[in-house]
């Protein structure tokens, strides 16, 4: 069991879920559980004197603010931006040059960017750890750690869990990190994709397709995702698929009795508000868990050289 202060893992960057081996993943989950129990532990000064940069080239509520709260809880200070129009990227500075600058100002860069692969481009030029907080339709690895954390917390185990992934599985970066992680821990994901928004081929091959009704009846976890309007080049294509799936209280009457509903958020209309008060609704707790999980991530990346 973690005490929050154990030997750091050898993690240098976290741009993909594949950066974490099984031991790293288990260590982060245990460490997050410690920080969840003790948000202001004796490790509160663990990152004192360190600076975390949150470089957000795309909007965010949960990821940025939970990373910033996590940094503050560990004693670090935070710099960053939320609107790239206020930075010199608006004058044509390349991502690589921006990252080189930020690496001179901070000890870690948590970045979100609209372009898939941007975090790996940043990693290639950064002298400090890069955390991918979402790269377009690419990946969102720390979201996966908190998704697994929430599943384990509420279901007691990950091995054998049946997880129905619902919605925009093409553009949804959270599921692109989540599917490989679920498979590694022995869970059984099935996909319920909106038309034309199926998982990328290599993930779809490992994740059988299902209908929403079949998944609702069979799954322990329904992981619902938003149709990612901002990823559509043509608004008409979005209009054709929006509202494809709605998880509501009526549907939940047909789920297993202990099934839970997760969503990385934000939601639009794919989880009806009549679900919010039901015991199955765990998505707000899932978002809250972003702080202890990201404390675990930052501590694991930074304490070695603190
Ligand atoms: N889940 C998630 O990434 O939320 P934000 O876009 O608000 O950060």
Image (tube, grey):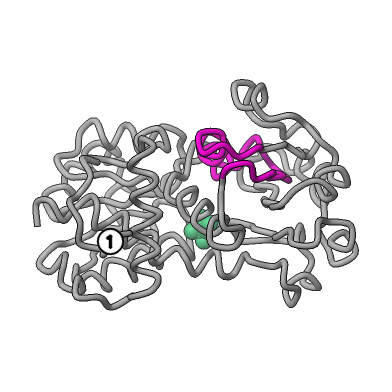
Magenta segment includes 187: yes
Magenta segment includes 132: no
- Residue 195 position within the rendered picture, expressed as x and y whole percent measured from the top left: 81, 35
Q: Quadrant of the N terminus?
A: bottom left
- Residue 37 position within the rendered picture, expressed as x and y whole percent measured from the top left: 38, 74
- Residue 299 position within the rendered picture, expressed as x and y whole percent measured from the top left: 24, 58
Q: Quadrant of residue 74?
A: bottom left
The answer to whether the residue bearing label 1 lies less than 8 angstroms from the nearest atom of ligand 1 is: no
Q: Quadrant of residue 70?
A: bottom left
Q: Nearer the viewer, residue 38 or 233?
A: 38
Q: Quadrant of residue 10?
A: top left
Q: Nearer the viewer, residue 69 or 259?
A: 259
- Residue 166 position within the rendered picture, expressed as x and y whole percent measured from the top left: 73, 45
Q: Secondary structure at mark 1?
A: strand
Count every numbered label the image shows and give the total.
Answer: 1
In the image, is 72 to the left or to the right of 66?
left
Tell me what residue is drawn at x 54 percent, y 59 percent: 150
Q: Nearer the viewer, residue 118 or 294?
A: 294
The residue singled out by tag 1 in the image is 80
User: For the residue carrying disc 1, how many other residues have a C-alpha within 10 Å: few (<14), some (14-19), or many (20+)?
Assistant: some
Looking at the picture, does residue 171 appear above or below residue 155?
A: above
| Magenta residue span | 159-188
Q: Quadrant of the C terminus?
A: bottom left
Looking at the picture, does residue 120 appear above or below residue 67?
A: above
Tell me what residue is drawn at x 72 percent, y 44 percent: 164
In the image, is 101 to the left or to the right of 168?
left
Tell me what residue is drawn at x 28 percent, y 37 percent: 122
Tell me what residue is drawn at x 24 percent, y 41 percent: 11
In the image, is 119 to the left or to the right of 193?
left
Looking at the picture, does residue 152 appear above or below residue 175?
A: below
């Amino acid at each position: 069991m973690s005490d929050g202060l154990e030997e750091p893992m050898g993690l240098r960057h976290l741009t993909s879920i594949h950066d974490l081996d099984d031991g790293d993943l288990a260590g982060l989950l245990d460490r997050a559980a410690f920080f969840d129990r003790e948000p202001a532990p004796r490790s509160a000064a663990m990152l004192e004197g360190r600076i975390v940069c949150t470089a957000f080239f795309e909007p965010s509520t949960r990821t940025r603010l939970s990373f910033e709260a996590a940094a503050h809880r560990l004693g670090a200070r935070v710099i960053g931006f939320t609107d790239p129009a206020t930075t010199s990227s608006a004058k044509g500075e390349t991502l690589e040059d921006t990252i080189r600058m930020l690496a001179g100002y901070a000890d870690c860069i948590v970045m979100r960017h609209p372009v898939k692969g941007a975090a790996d481009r940043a990693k290639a030029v950064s002298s400090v750890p890069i955390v991918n907080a979402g790269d377009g339709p690419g990946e969102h690895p720390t979201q996966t750690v908190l998704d697994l954390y929430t599943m384990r917390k509420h279901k007691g185990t990950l091995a054998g869990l049946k997880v129905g992934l619902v919605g925009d599985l093409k553009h949804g970066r959270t599921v692109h990190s989540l599917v490989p992680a679920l498979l590694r821990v022995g869970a059984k994901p099935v996909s319920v994709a909106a038309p034309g928004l199926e998982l990328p081929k290599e993930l779809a091959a490992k994740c059988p397709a299902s209908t929403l009704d079949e998944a609702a009846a069979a799954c322990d976890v329904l992981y619902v995702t938003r149709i990612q309007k901002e990823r559509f080049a043509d608004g008409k294509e979005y209009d054709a698929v929006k509202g494809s799936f709605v998880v509501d209280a009526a549907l939940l009457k047909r789920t297993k009795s202990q099934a839970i509903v997760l969503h990385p958020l934000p939601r639009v209309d794919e989880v009806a508000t009549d679900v919010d008060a039901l015991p199955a609704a765990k998505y707000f707790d899932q978002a809250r868990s972003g702080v202890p999980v990201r404390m675990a991530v930052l501590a694991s990346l930074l304490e070695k050289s603190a």
